[in-house]
Structure formats: C-alpha cells, structure tokens
C-alpha cells in the first residue's frame, strides 16, 4: 500500500459545556446522525461519552490533520465544545464477537 494513501488515526477529546444551552440539546439528533454516517463510512472508529466528566472521545481515521479538522468542524455540536486532538501511534481494538453460525 502506498504510504501517501494510508490513514492516520487521531484521538479527539471533546469537553462539553457545564450548562448545556438549549441550542446544543436541540442539535443532538443531528450530531448522532452525522456520527452514525461517519461510523458507517469508517471515518470514526469509536465514539464514547462519559456523563460524569462531561467528556466525549472519538477515534477518527483521516489521511491528514486538515481533513480530520474538516470532519470535526462539520459535526453540529463541535462549536459548543473544547476540542483537543492527539495523533495516535497506533490504535488496536478487539473485534466484535459474532455468534457462531449453526446450520442446525
């Protein structure tokens, strides 16, 4: 594989506002739709929310940080959150377990 076509992985750490404005809450369905689309396209590898710390984490796959920033900026809730980006050296994940197929 040509290294110029390979994807880099980035951990994006979002900090939610302490008081969620009404506009933020009203955009949550749009956020979920955008995240689900990026997940199905393989551009987001995982997405997690911690309610206790008002933190949201996502691992993105992108060819460059500029393209990552385009994706992050396109999310409806990004403007309300602080964003910190870290390029990952590697990203390992367990494969989801699928039940064994039985012809019985």
Image (tube, rainbow, N blue to C red):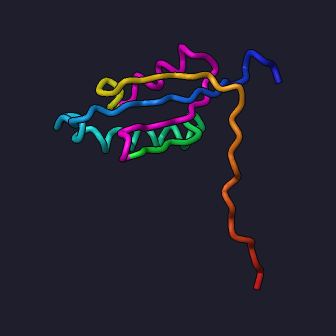
Q: Name the residue at the front extreme.
A: 52
98 versus 25 height, above or below: below
Give the x, y percent position of residue 101: 74, 73
Q: Which residues are magenta?
A: 51-75
Q: Name the residue at the left extreme.
A: 22
* Residue nearest the observer in this picture, 5 or 58: 58
* Residue nearest the observer in this picture, 71 or 56: 56
Give the x, y percent position of residue 55: 40, 37
Relative horizontal placement of residue 83, taking residue 80 as reference (left or right): right
Residue 94 among those drawn in magenta: no
Residue 69 among those drawn in magenta: yes
Relative horizontal placement of residue 28, taking residue 6 as reference (left or right): left
- The image quarter containing residue 73 is top left
* Quarter containing the N terminus: top right
The residue at the point 18 percent across, 34 percent down is 21
Give the x, y percent position of residue 75: 39, 30
Relative horizontal placement of residue 60, taking residue 33 as reference (left or right): right
Give the x, y percent position of residue 85: 52, 22
The residue at the point 60 percent across, 38 percent down is 42
């Amino acid at each position: 594989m040509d290294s110029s076509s390979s994807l880099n992985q980035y951990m994006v750490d979002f900090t939610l506002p302490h008081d969620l404005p009404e506009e933020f809450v009203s955009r949550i369905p749009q956020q979920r739709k955008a995240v689900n689309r990026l997940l199905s396209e393989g551009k987001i590898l995982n997405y997690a929310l911690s309610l206790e710390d008002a933190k949201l984490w996502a691992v993105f796959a992108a060819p460059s940080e500029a393209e990552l920033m385009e994706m992050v900026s396109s999310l409806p809730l990004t403007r309300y959150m602080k964003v910190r980006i870290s390029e990952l050296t590697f990203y390992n994940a367990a494969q989801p377990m699928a039940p064994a197929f039985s012809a019985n």
